[in-house]
Image: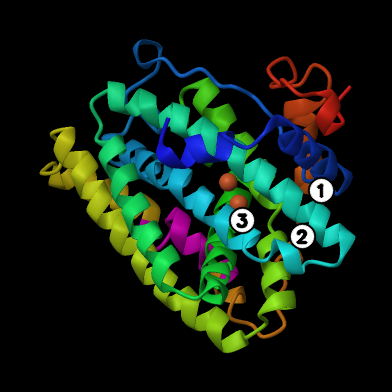
Amino acid sequence: MTAAATELHATPAPKAASRQALGTTVNIPPRRLDFEFKAEQKPRYFYGNDPFLSSFWNTFSSLLPQGEFFFVRSVRAYRDRITDPTLNAQVSGFIGQEAMHSKEHDSYNKMLVEMGFPVDKLDRDVGKLLKLVGKTLPKSVQLAATACLEHYTAIMAEQLLRDKDHQGMMNDPDILHMWMWHALEENEHKTVAWDLYQQEVGSYALRVFTMVIATVILFSVMAVFQGRMLAADGKLFNFRENLKGFRFLFGFKGLFAALVPKYLDFFRTDFHPNDHDTTALLAEWKQILFAPGGELYGQLKNKAAVGVH
Ligand SMILES: [Fe+2]
Ligand SMILES: [Fe+2]
């Protein structure tokens, strides 16, 4: 387990239980699923059987255990100042959900290491970067960065929940389920860091300035890490395949091009994450995954605590 995951899970059980209970009251239930990822049973290239695209999502996964722990730290830094009981419960749900995401991606990333991908080294490097951010930047900037990166995760997750072709590219049911569960919960808690930022910091200038910097850093880190993943896999110089994969993501009709309008909404002065209405979408996916008989119903370990019967 990474240092980040160890620290998160060192939290005493009663605290975890109260996070589950509080989060569930505001529809941000931290669901525990305990995925088991065994290298010998999983495809090396889970996304479209494609080395470049699979590496891209695996690189993204390499950022998550440390990244989500950074989100938790930045929100926790304001915890004592929250007086609104609803926001307080939402923060509990947020921390609980991100802790579970960190845990499951940590387990997934370990499988990637067994497959020979340098995800442990990427995790270590992103941890160092975020530690430096934590030591040097004011907590207001750290909360702004969390609100920015949560906007990314919310719009990417919404796209995955809506786009059947995108889902259909994943050729392993467990890996697909991990991403769909994560996507559902990212949208369940998408307002939390935003509302906390608006309430406790509120600066529009800081929000948009941080988004520009966060975007540059995110894509620079992703590019370097993707290069390291492809090099370790012996695929770095497969120019034709890599270009095809790059176009699939960033070309004119690519997945990220489709996200640009929603990304830009963040720069509106009057934007709120709920302007992207995902109410019906979340109800649909909760039904598909967690209703009795749903695809992950049997795997859900804390049914009662998260209001599933
Ligand atoms: Fe997450
Ligand atoms: Fe999140």
Q: Residue at x 23, y 40 (%)?
A: 229
State which tag comes first along the sequence, 3 or 2.
3
Dot 2: few (<14), some (14–19), or many (≥20) neighbours within 10 Å? few
> As shown in the figure, which amino acid type bears the numbered disc 2?
Asp
Q: In the rendered structure, which amino acid carries the disc numbered 3?
A: Ala
Residue 109: x %, y % from top left: 39, 31
Which quadrant does the C terminus fall into? top right
Tell me if residue 3 is in the magenta stretch.
no
**Residue with the mark numbered 2:** 277
Highlighted magenta segment, given as a residue range? 250-262
Q: Amino acid at mark 1?
A: Ala
Is ligand 2 within 8 Å of the beta carbon of the residue shown at mark 3? yes
First along the sequence among labels 3 and 1: 3
Name the one closer to the observer, 52 or 226: 226
Camera-nearest residue between 210 and 283: 210
The x, y position of residue 216, in whole percent, is 36, 70
Q: Which residue is mark 1?
A: 280
Tag 2 near tag 1, CB within 8 Å: yes
Q: Please give the residue where the numbered disc 3 appears in the rendered image.
A: 154
Give the SS element for disc 3: helix
